[in-house]
Amino acid sequence: MIKFFESAIQNLNGWGIMVFILILGSVELFFGLLEGKWSKNDKILDIVCLIAPRFIFSALIGFFSLKILPFILPGLKDAFVWIPFIFGFFIILVTIDLSQYWYHRLHHQIPVLWRFHRTHHSARYMSVVVNSRQNIFYVAFLSQFYITAALVYLGLGGPALLFNGFQTVWSYACHTSVKWDKVLYRYKILHPVAWFLERLLVTPATHHAHHAASHGDGIGYYKGNFGGILFIWDLIFGTAHISRKFPKQYGISNYEDDPWYAQWLWPIFKSPIISSELAKDGPEVKEEGDDLEVIKELKNA
């Protein structure tokens, strides 16, 4: 039974997740849920961000696990192997998700960090592929990779595999344009389930609000709802917004279609659009409603 469970987890983390992404993505395309907003530039960026990091960072994490961890934690290999599986899972869940909450939040609140995270918010649509749409350096410093590797080294390999599968599936399920949680809000008998779920875990409604192009309309809330899996961090730290409604528009209100290579590899490559935050000497951060023509005039002065 244990071997079967371990095999199921390994399959989930391998081909299982890719099948899940393929199914959800196919549903989005079949029902036209991207509403014709998936441009050629977006397609290249989304596909590169989905595939490339899997090859780049597998080698990096392997080196970190095999070389760095034994050096900085000598003699501690399998030190936590005595911890029961379920407790190990919750240790990993709380540790990684809390660190991700603050990592995400800081990238919205510190201008220079925003430029690295901006790629994730530039999509004018919600989709499973948006989940992976990140600047390469934002991904490189994600704490979950290194904390997970450390906890595996310390003996929590099984719980770490389960957490990775659960986190990945849930994150894709909250970015998809398939608004599966709507049924919980539609029927009164399910409202108690919705109330509990949306306060414990991130849902499509709360995360779609975070990706809205506007803020302050009672629905969009890109200055909060930073949770990755657990929504309780937003409740605890005062950044939660629950409306049970979905934004009419997604993305960045002043987005100007920066080339995919600039979004993926900034600051190595800059955007040729001079008023962009990703351009050379571009504005550090542009708030909703900034006058782009004024910015261009200042740049050309």
Image (cartoon, grey):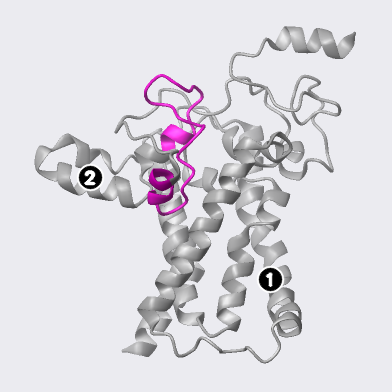
Q: Residue at x 57, y 21 (%)?
A: 253
| Residue 210 located within the stretch drawn in magenta | yes
- The residue pinned by badge 2 equals 194
Q: Nearer the viewer, residue 44 or 257?
A: 257
Q: Which one is in front, 237 or 73?
A: 237
Specify the segment rendered in magenta. Answer: 208-236
Identify the residue shown where x is 20% and y is 42%: 184
Q: Quadrant of the C terminus?
A: top right
Out of 275 and 13, give the one closest to the viewer: 275
Q: Secondary structure at mark 2?
A: helix
The answer to whether mark 1 and mark 2 are in CB contact below 8 A is no
Q: Amino acid at mark 2?
A: Ala
Question: Can I make out residue 218 in this image?
Answer: yes
Quadrant position of the N terminus in the picture? bottom left
What numbered label is drawn on residue 61?
A: 1
Q: Give the SS element for disc 1.
A: helix
Expressed as whole percent of the image width and height from the top left, the position of residue 199 reads 31, 47
Q: Is residue 149 left or right of residue 186?
A: right
Q: Which residue in the rendered view is the most extreme toward the right?
A: 301
Direction from residue 92 to residue 31 in the image, left or right: left
Near mark 1 (Cα within 10 A), the count class, few <14, some 14-19 or many ≥20, is: some
Nearer-the-camera pick, 248 or 72 = 72
Q: Which mark is residue 14?
A: none
Mark 1 or mark 2, earlier in chain: 1
Can you give x and y, in whole percent of width and height, for residue 152 in the image? 56, 79
- In the displayed structure, 24 sits above or below 31; it is below
Q: Which kind of residue does numbered mark 1 sit on? A: Ile
Q: In the figure, residue 170 lies in which quadrant?
A: bottom left
Q: Is residue 144 magenta?
A: no
Image height of 224 relative to 255, above or below: below
Instruction: Work out how far the residue at label 1 is from the one at label 2, CA to CA, in angstroms.
Output: 37 Å
